[in-house]
């Protein structure tokens, strides 16, 4: 690791500490908060600064309770400067020598910096720490709210609960998806390797590539030309399960930024139509930029309020994808700030919203058409219980069972599949939908 100039490192750590004081109390997602911060200070901070701040802040969210326990042990309870220093060490942004030197300069009362450094790297809790319960120890070890530990321990058992929680404190791999409309995977591997980047193919997705190290991709010519997109393998696998065919009409109800729409368009070879909607209209503007770059010509963003006026919707669509708004408990390793914003009572609110979205969408599914309901949540209220309610209300829907699970639903878990966590339910409409009756 290249040593950082001590004065420059001191400045970076001070700025990161100020960021941490502000961002940890914000209700805004960390990625959006940081993006706005960097935009406001675009003339002040370069790419190296942005990387240092982002990775340190994500490390703080990832290891919050663990690092707080060490800050108390060292007599500086929740001190943002010490928290930032420890997080930057755990994220590999500063070396052990730099950690010890900065500790000596800024926290002279800490006489065991070398031992602390080793404990942080090994992820060992302070030796004298006392716990009120086994669940509290797990909560601090893996930096998750106590209520979530109790919930997952009851549901999965302690061993699997800890394995799942351990996956949430790992940095997720950088995964990209090649754009089949413009690029073959083997060719893209060669281009990346020519630039000195080590990559290997994803195990299940035929389009994915995993990077051995973190690199900056957005400024590359290949990204600008639409040869690839950043997309977790789990998201790619969900599209693989949908198996969109050329000529079909697919409605992506909650399209968001359009990652799944883009892959579905490529799977359809630009033939047929993908109708993309989202309650947040600004997200569709981002999608327009992305599908132009990707060369996806069969995606048509549409306003939800006017969706029934569409000729395709009146006829009924072949497939409906509902990638529903959810708690995101399957993505905590990628969005570690989310675990401090989620409230257990919100699962019931998400359930109501998810059921309502399905109910509003189903009338446009033609006879023989298929519904795909997906979330990046691991919670039954948002997954199995939503579909139980939908199947009870709609006997015309026949479950399409995934053959390798006992209940017929498809799932991905971070600790088992090395992807984000996902749930997918599939069903076929056996009677005429609203579209065919108009």
Image (cartoon, helix red, strand yellow):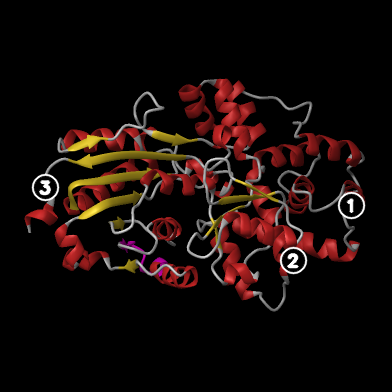
Q: Secondary structure at mark 1?
A: helix
Q: Secondary structure at mark 3?
A: loop
Does label 2 or label 3 sit earlier along the sequence? Answer: 2
Does label 1 or label 2 sit earlier along the sequence? Answer: 2
Task: Report which quarter residue 143 is drawn in.
Answer: top right
Instruction: Measure the alpha-carbon separation of dots 3 and 1.
Output: 68 Å
- Out of 352 and 277, give the one closest to the viewer: 277
**Picture layout, residue 358 above or below residue 181:** above
Residue for badge 1: 98
Relative image position of residue 337 (x, y in whole percent): 57, 49
Dots 3, 1 in contact, CB < 8 A: no
Dots 2, 3 in contact, CB < 8 A: no
Instruction: Measure the alpha-carbon separation of dots 2 and 3.
Output: 57 Å
Relative image position of residue 110 (x, y in whole percent): 88, 42
Find the magenta span and give its range.
Answer: 273-283
Relative image position of residue 54 (x, y in whole percent): 67, 58
């Amino acid at each position: 690791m290249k040593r950082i100039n001590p004065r420059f490192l001191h400045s970076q750590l001070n700025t990161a500490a100020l960021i941490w004081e502000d961002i940890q109390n914000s209700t805004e997602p960390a990625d959006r908060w940081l993006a706005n911060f960097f935009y406001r200070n675009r003339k002040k901070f370069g790419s190296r600064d942005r990387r240092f701040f982002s990775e340190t802040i994500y490390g703080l969210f990832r290891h919050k309770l663990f690092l707080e326990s060490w800050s108390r042990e060292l007599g500086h309870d929740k001190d943002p400067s010490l928290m930032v220093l420890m997080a930057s060490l755990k994220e590999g942004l500063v070396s052990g020598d730099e950690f010890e030197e900065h500790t000596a300069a800024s926290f002279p009362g800490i006489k065991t910096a070398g031992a602390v450094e080793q404990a942080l790297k090994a992820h060992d809790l302070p030796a004298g720490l006392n716990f009120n319960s086994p669940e509290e120890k797990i909560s601090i070890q893996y930096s998750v709210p106590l209520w979530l530990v109790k919930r997952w321990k009851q549901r999965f058992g302690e061993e699997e609960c800890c394995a799942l929680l351990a996956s949430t404190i790992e940095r997720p791999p950088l995964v990209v998806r090649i754009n089949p409309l413009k690029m073959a995977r083997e060719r893209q591997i060669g281009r990346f390797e020519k630039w000195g980047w080590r990559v290997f193919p994803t195990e299940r997705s035929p389009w994915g590539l995993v990077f051995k190290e973190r690199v900056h991709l957005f400024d590359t010519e290949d990204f600008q030309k639409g040869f690839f997109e950043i997309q977790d393998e789990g998201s790619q696998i969900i599209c693989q399960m949908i198996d969109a065919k050329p000529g079909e009409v697919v409605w992506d109800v909650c399209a968001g930024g359009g990652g799944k729409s883009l892959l579905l368009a490529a799977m359809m070879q630009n033939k047929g139509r993908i109708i993309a909607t989202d309650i947040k209209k600004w997200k569709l503007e981002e999608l327009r930029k992305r599908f132009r770059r990707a060369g996806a010509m069969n995606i048509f963003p549409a306003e939800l309020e006017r969706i029934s006026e569409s000729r395709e919707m009146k006829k009924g669509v072949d497939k409906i994808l509902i990638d529903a708004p959810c708690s995101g408990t399957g993505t905590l390793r990628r969005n570690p700030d989310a675990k401090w914003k989620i409230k257990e009572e919100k699962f019931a609110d998400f359930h109501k919203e998810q059921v309502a979205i399905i109910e509003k969408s189903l009338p446009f599914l033609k006879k023989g058409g298929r519904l795909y309901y997906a979330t990046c949540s691991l919670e039954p209220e948002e997954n199995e219980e939503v579909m139980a309610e939908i199947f009870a209300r709609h006997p015309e829907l026949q479950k399409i069972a995934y053959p390798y699970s006992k209940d017929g639903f498809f799932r991905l878990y971070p600790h088992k599949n090395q992807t984000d966590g996902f749930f997918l339910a599939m069903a076929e409409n056996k009677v005429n939908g609203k579209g065919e009756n108009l």
